[in-house]
Amino acid sequence: MSKKKKRKSNNGISNLSNTILSILKKERNQAFNYKQIAAKLGVNDASSRNQIIKKLRDLQGKNEIEEVERGKFKAVINTEYHTGILDLSGKGTGYVICDDFDEDVFIASNNINKALNGDEVEFYVYKRRKRGKIEGEIVNVIKREKTEYVGVIQLHEKYAFVIADSNKMYKDIFIPINKVNKAENGDKVLVRLEDWPEKADSPYGKVIEVLGKPGEHNTEIHAILAEYGLPFEFPYEVEQYANNLDTSITPEEIAKRRDMRQDLTFTIDPKDAKDFDDALSFTVLKDGLYEIGIHIADVSHYVKEGTVLDDEAYERATSVYLVDRVVPMLPEVLSNNACSLRPHEEKYTFSAVFQMNDKCEIKNEWFGRTVTYSDARFAYEEAQAIIESKTNEIPEDVSLSGKAYQADQKIADAILKMDELAKKMRNKRMRSGAISFDKVEVKFNLDENANPIGVFFKTSKDANKLIEEFMLLANRKVSEFIGKQSPKKTFVYRVHDEPDVSKLANLQGIVSKFGYKLNFKDRKTTSASLNNLLTEVVGKKEQNLVDTLAIRSMSKAEYTTNNIGHYGLAFDYYSHFTSPIRRYPDVMAHRLLQHYLDGGKSANEEAYEDKCKHSSDMENLATKAERDSIKYMQIKFMEDHKEEHFVGVISGVTDWGIYVEIIENKCEGMVSVRDMKDDHYAFDQDLYAMIGRSTKNMYQLGDEVVVKVKNTDLVKKHLDFNLIGKYENE
């Protein structure tokens, strides 16, 4: 008897009730008979059809489905459906982010139902909480977030599979043999999803590009760009259009502009900069006033709406700054030549010109198109040398030429006065509640083959802050000029909402482990205590961790036509106006400003809001690609240091292991709990710690430990450490 039951069970269709319900709920406006359901399940034998017929009657008896016409059934819909965005974990489970709920809705792996990370999905929520969480089931994919994936292809005789690099892609992608696009076994490829049949375990796709061999430098860099849908070259027609532009400076065009070629003008940029999209001019006026011009490359003069050049710039929306290269928004003829404010060249510019006194009070402002001439180019290090020495002497170790020289005295005096004014403006911002995020940037020294031979940290000094303050001034005043007009005018704002209370509470919980306290009573105390925290951690082992956590506690800045102000800068009005070579929103700001200066009516708000959302989305993708390239280069750097011991700070603790950031080079890797052999360790969520069951050894967030490289994986961008032990500082 038991054998018969077992045989019957083995021949049955597993989980048939839920499968039928899933089919009927997914297409709940359509009625199905048993033959159609069998076809969706990919079965056609008599036994399977009989099981389906019987199960349909069972479900009808339980009032879970109804017979709407003879032999045709629909699901009984007695639940409410919601839509949201799926955020998948590497484990295959996920959460749906939905405005209808105060918390994210947990989705178990068996209820994902072919949705992928980032998809817009339709789902319903179970009546009872499970696992202490709101839990639901996805019934329909409304819109795929992405359809292209990077991975490694495995060829078989009649088909292939691509194993995606992303740990959030939980299925291998099936490729018919006629769609492998000449890829060889083991190649890294870009694939596009084409279909996911009802009965198929994996999605179907085709190879659209062969990127190269895994682990090779160019392959991995191109793979990073491809993963986020970012291009690495311009289409031929766009290059041709740009190359055929008239980039000469003509008397006819000069006559339409304010001529500021006689004003003392200079640029301050990084040593290795190739494009200079902003310059400053300085003139001493009567009555203790200074006229300071912020001059921005007039990109919109060349990039006209409705052209292939503008279409390409809009699609890119931003330049992408990878470790070893820049993927520009505009072709080189513009970004490095016509729109670059190079020394001793006349350029078309869009300017914000202010007259201010020693108290930084603005007495007059002017906005419009100009023509300028840059008298000199400075690296940040050169300007910093002037600020620190208060002379015009440039030492050879910081000069662009590598030779000591004396800068023009008038320019040196201008830099010193503008530094003085910039510090006053910065102090005023801080008193108003601005937050000072001077996060350390990781940079690499690369050899001629783009191999990392050293790591260094880029910090912001007075010269950087001088430029920053005057760019902030231009951005704020342009935004204010349009934002205060009546009737209201459509404009592109850069906004930053107030921080999330729960994220601030989480930040407090973590930094308290290091002995810091925060005060969230009101906006001013929040800003003040965050600034105190960021100042106190400077130079300490936990600085990068605290800086990162503080930034994560903030809301994300974004582009929108709906101005809510900028919390982090403490500005009521703020836009991006100063970098049109590398940011499309700045191009839009230039166009709108000129349109309103010419007396034009308010632009279409809905159209510009769509452009703002696209720009924010592309900025987010570019940021992810930039982070991936840094991670890739860090792992490449650590490949040559496998035998060394490093002191690091525990930067994260999870139930699968601890993350450690090496102090001397900021490279972060993971120590798996499975490799912590001296005890059985368990994750304590409240203490942010891993605690040994027998020894009670504790490895806590912020602890200093000694690690050694266990494994470097350039393809997956994983860095694994072996834990040597706690660092004993003698």
Image (cartoon, rainbow, N blue to C red):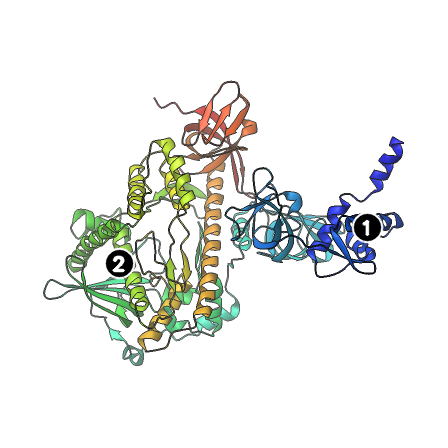
Task: Please determine whether, in this image, residue 614 is positioned above or below residue 117.
Answer: below
Identified at 39% across, 67% down, the residue is: 587
Q: Which mark is residue 470?
A: 2
Specify few, some or many for label 2: CA neighbours under 10 Å numbering under 14, 14-19, or 20 or more.
Answer: many
Residue 415, quarter of the rendered image: bottom left
Which amino acid type is marked by label 1? Arg
- Residue 490: x, y in percent? 38, 69
Residue 481, quarter of the rendered image: bottom left
Residue 474, quarter of the rendered image: bottom left
Which amino acid type is marked by label 2? Phe
> Considering the numbered disc 1 on the image, is that residue within a helix, a strand or a loop?
helix
Q: Is residue 433 left or right of residue 54?
A: left
Q: Is residue 47 left or right of residue 24?
A: right
Of discs 1 and 2, which sits in the foreground?
1
Quadrant into which the C terminus falls: top left
Identified at 75% across, 44% down, the residue is: 15
Specify few, some or many for label 1: CA neighbours under 10 Å numbering under 14, 14-19, or 20 or more.
Answer: some
The residue indicated by pointer 1 is: 57
Identified at 46% across, 24% down, the residue is: 698
**Residue that extends furthest to the top in the rendered view of this protein:** 694
- Residue 494: x, y in percent? 37, 59
Task: Please determine whether, in this image, residue 493 is positioned above or below residue 497.
Answer: below
- Residue 691: x, y in percent? 49, 25
Q: Earlier in the sequence, mark 1 or mark 2?
A: 1
Task: Please determine whether, in this image, residue 682 is positioned above or below residue 17.
Answer: above
> Considering the numbered disc 2 on the image, is that residue within a helix, a strand or a loop?
helix
